[in-house]
Image (cartoon, rainbow, N blue to C red):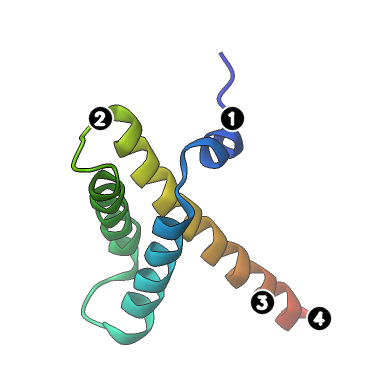
């Protein structure tokens, strides 16, 4: 059994929810110093699930949960890619 995380992200993520998660995660990281950074993905996962369930009309299924988690994962993935690219640019 092959597990392709990229294909799962493409299939299940909801882009508006991923964008919201990215903005909320950025705001938490830079403006809310009380919350440790390692809790941000957990917060975004819960936010993503709630948003996708809300968009689907409060239908709580495995696909909606997976959509919320994948949307939050996409937001974290994009943020980490940006951070890593900036780090590579600073090393040169």
Q: Which residue is mark 3?
A: 86
Looking at the rendered image, the disc whose residue lies closer to the viewer, 3 or 2, is: 2
Disc 1 or 3, which lies upstream in sequence? 1
Disc 1 or 2, which lies upstream in sequence? 1
User: Separation of disc 3 and disc 2 at Cα?
Assistant: 38 Å
Disc 1 or 4, which lies upstream in sequence? 1
**Which residue reaches farthest top?**
1
Instruction: Give the side of residue 45 with respect to residue 59, left or right.
Output: right
What is the crowding at mark 3: few (fewer than 14 residues within 10 Å), some, or many (at least 20)? few
Q: Is residue 23 above or below residue 21?
A: below
Q: Nearer the viewer, residue 11 or 30?
A: 11
Q: Secondary structure at mark 1?
A: loop
Disc 3 or 2, which lies upstream in sequence? 2
Q: Residue at x 41, y 75 (%)?
A: 26
Q: Is residue 53 above or below residue 60?
A: below
* Quarter of the image with the C terminus in it: bottom right
Q: Residue at x 47, y 59 (%)?
A: 75
Q: Which residue is mark 1?
A: 4
Q: Nearer the viewer, residue 79 or 71?
A: 71
What is the crowding at mark 4: few (fewer than 14 residues within 10 Å), some, or many (at least 20)? few
Q: Residue at x 32, y 53 (%)?
A: 48
- Where residue 62 appears, as percent x and y from the top left, is 29, 28
What is the crowding at mark 1: few (fewer than 14 residues within 10 Å), some, or many (at least 20)? few
User: Separation of disc 3 and disc 4 at Cα?
Assistant: 10 Å
Checking the image for residue 92, the label placed there is: 4
* Quarter of the image with the N terminus in it: top right
Checking the image for residue 61, the label placed there is: 2
Q: Secondary structure at mark 3?
A: helix
Q: Nearer the viewer, residue 91 or 71?
A: 71
User: Separation of disc 2 and disc 4 at Cα?
Assistant: 47 Å
- Where residue 83 appears, as percent x and y from the top left, is 58, 71
Looking at the rendered image, the disc whose residue lies closer to the viewer, 1 or 4, is: 1
């Amino acid at each position: 059994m092959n597990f392709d995380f990229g294909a799962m992200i493409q299939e299940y993520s909801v882009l508006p929810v991923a964008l919201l998660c990215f903005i909320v995660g950025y705001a938490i990281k830079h403006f809310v110093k009380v919350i440790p950074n390692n809790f941000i993905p957990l917060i975004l996962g819960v936010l993503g699930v709630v948003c996708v369930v809300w968009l689907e009309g409060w239908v709580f299924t495995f696909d909606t949960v997976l959509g919320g988690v994948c949307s939050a994962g996409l937001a974290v993935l994009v943020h980490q890619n940006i951070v890593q690219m900036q780090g590579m640019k600073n090393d040169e």
